[in-house]
Amino acid sequence: MSSASLDVVCVGNALVDVLAHADDAFVESHGMVKGSMQLIDDVVAHELYADMASAVEISGGSAANTAAGFASLGGDIAFIGKVSDDQLGEVFAHDIRAAGVRFQPPAAPDAPTGRCLIIVSPDAERTLNTFLGASSLITPDDIDELLVEQARVLYCEGYLWDQADAKAAILKAMRAAGAAGRKVAFTLSDSFCVDRHRDEFRDLAENHVDILFANEPEICSLYEVDTFDEAAKHVSGHCELAALTRGAAGCVVITSDGERVEVPAFPVDQVVDTTGAGDLFASGFLYGLTHGRDLENCARLAGLAAAEVISHVGARPEVSLAGLAASNGLA
């Protein structure tokens, strides 16, 4: 196995987030399930956007957010995702490169760049309405196997599993990483996403993934159990590491040999917007893991990164996470 020249390569949806605040009545009146993600088409995207209040546009996408957070910690990371040759595509490419992430988009398809219309409720919960557009058109041909083989860790998002070609692209990347002796990390992304692909996600956890990321509803959905502890027992035998978040209760890291590391949530003065909390948790955890930190330190870095992103609107850090880590004794 050759030495890695890159810390992580991420594969995910390349999206631009459009965020607006609204009350729960707005969420209900548009048939949304608060706190979830639903896929919408171009027509619904335009209708919903017309009804939204004044909005902020920020580059997003789950794995892309993770890449931006990882780069902010000082890591060397690349992102594979698809945008169109349009204004939002230019915005996305500029933003992710400016964050310090390597990004060379595949040829643009005949579809607009994807966007995620996010409703932020008064309690800071976010409800996502995603028009995938060009991002969903990623195919196995778009996977740079040489790039994957150069990274210590391949990180993929579960949201891509909804599209057959994108699923095939992820599997190609996983095979390339495995053949090169690299680690494969996967995030379940959303409990409704788990509901749609439970059997396949279980197979991934048991046979293809070394590092699994999930929040409490997602991991309980994966194993169809009512309690976190039941789910934790299941996952402990299925992958090398499971990094599980529990909101204000912090996180639990579970290893295949039964070790369990529990770390409290990093304190936040005010939760403004939970968009990207899980994405940035993965940033911190993967940074620690690829830089020789023990599991407790990985989890603390993860909590710190998540705390920063939920303290403001938007799913990418507004300050240097490396500086924040240093000031909190986690450098």
Image (cartoon, grey):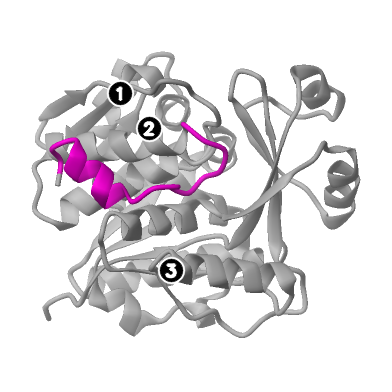
Asked if labels 3 and 1 touch by Cβ distance under 8 angstroms, the answer is: no
Which residue corresponds to the image point at 55% horizontal and 31% vertical from the top-left? 273
- Front of the two marks 2 and 1: 2
Up-down: is 152 above or below 22? Answer: below
Which label lies toward us, 2 or 3? Answer: 2
Q: Secondary structure at mark 3?
A: strand
The three-letter amino acid code for the residue at tag 3 is Phe
Amino acid type for the residue under numbered disc 1: Ala
Q: Earlier in the sequence, mark 2 or mark 3?
A: 3
Question: Which disc, if any, is residue 307?
Answer: 2
Q: Is residue 302 left or right of residue 311?
A: left
Amino acid marked by disc 2: Ala
Magenta segment:
311-330
Which mark, by number, is residue 79? 3
Q: Which residue is mark 1?
A: 265
Mark 2, secondary structure of its residue: helix
Left of 129 or right of it: where is 290? left
In terms of secondary structure, what is the magenta stretch mainly?
A: loop
Comparing 221 with 51, the one in front is 51
Residue at screen point 62% across, 85% down: 107
Is residue 205 a member of the stretch shown in magenta? no
Instruction: Confirm or deny contact between disc 2 and disc 1 (CB under 8 A).
Output: yes
| Extreme residue in the top direction | 227
Task: Name the spot of residue 300 as percent of width and height, x first.
Answer: 21, 34
How far across and down, in percent of the image, does residue 232 sit? 28, 25
The residues tagged by marks 2 and 1 sit, at their Cα atoms, a distance apart of: 8 Å
